[in-house]
Structures are given as structure tokens and as C-alpha cells.
Image: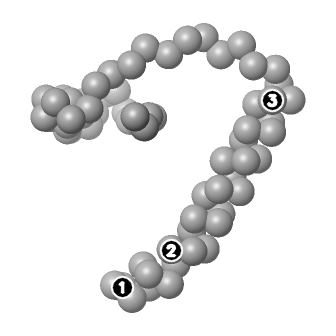
Amino acid sequence: MCTITLEYDQNSALARRKLAMLLATGLFMTKEIMQDTTEPEEKEDAQKEVEAFFATSKKSMSNVIARYL
């Protein structure tokens, strides 16, 4: 099972409708998350890891995406 985190404008009716449609498919479900109790150093390390992941991902996908532009 994988987890996806979505950020959206809660004041946007379109965003709320699309999210409701996505959840209505039954393929996805909402999940309550616990309060964040990590230390600031751990957060910093995790943020650096995420940034490195995205940088690598963008670099590896750039050639694939460029073919379709």
C-alpha cells in the first residue's frame, strides 16, 4: 500500500469536486495522520532526502518528457 499526500485550495470548488470524484471511485481512501513529533534535525534530513529524490527523478525523466514536448 502506498500513500499519496495532496495539497489543494480548500476554497476551490473545482478542487473539492475533483477530490470527491477521485475518492468516489473507491480506488483511494483517506487516512488520518498522527501529529508530527519528529525532531527538527530529523525533519531537515527528511526534507533533504525528498529534495534529492525529486532532483534525481526530474533528471532521469527529463529525456522521456522531452520526447513528447
Q: If you read the primary sequence from the N terminus, does the residue marked by circle 2 or circle 1 appear first?
A: 2
Identify residue for label 2: 61
At horizontal 39% and vertical 19% (from top left) the residue drawn is 31
Q: Which one is earlier in the sequence, the residue at label 1 or at label 3?
A: 3
Determine whether the residue tagged by mark 3 lies in a helix, strand or loop.
helix
- Residues at marks 2 and 1 touching, judged by CB atoms closer than 8 Å: no
Residue 10: percent from left, percent from top: 34, 27
**Residue at label 1?**
69
SS type, badge 2: helix
* Amino acid type assigned to the residue bearing label 1 in the image: Leu
> In the image, 13: left or right of 5?
left
The quarter holding residue 3 reads top left
Q: How crowded is mark 1: few (under 14 residues within 10 Å), some or many (20 or more)?
A: few
Q: Can residue 49 be seen in this view?
A: yes
- What is the quadrant of the N terminus in the image? top left
Q: Is residue 59 shown left or right of residue 46?
A: left
**Which of 28/17 is in front?**
28
- Quadrant of residue 53 within the rendered picture: bottom right
Element at label 1 = loop
Vertical side of 33 occupied by 27: above or below: below
Q: Which residue is drawn at 55% across and 11% down?
A: 34
Look at discs 1 and 3 and give the one toward the viewer: 3
Q: Mark 3 points at which residue?
A: 42
Which tag, 3 or 2, sits closer to the chain's start? 3
In the figure, 27 relative to 49: above or below? above
Marks 2/1: CA–CA distance: 13 Å
Q: Real-space Cα distance between discs 3 and 2?
A: 28 Å
Q: Which residue is drawn at 61% across and 74% down?
A: 59
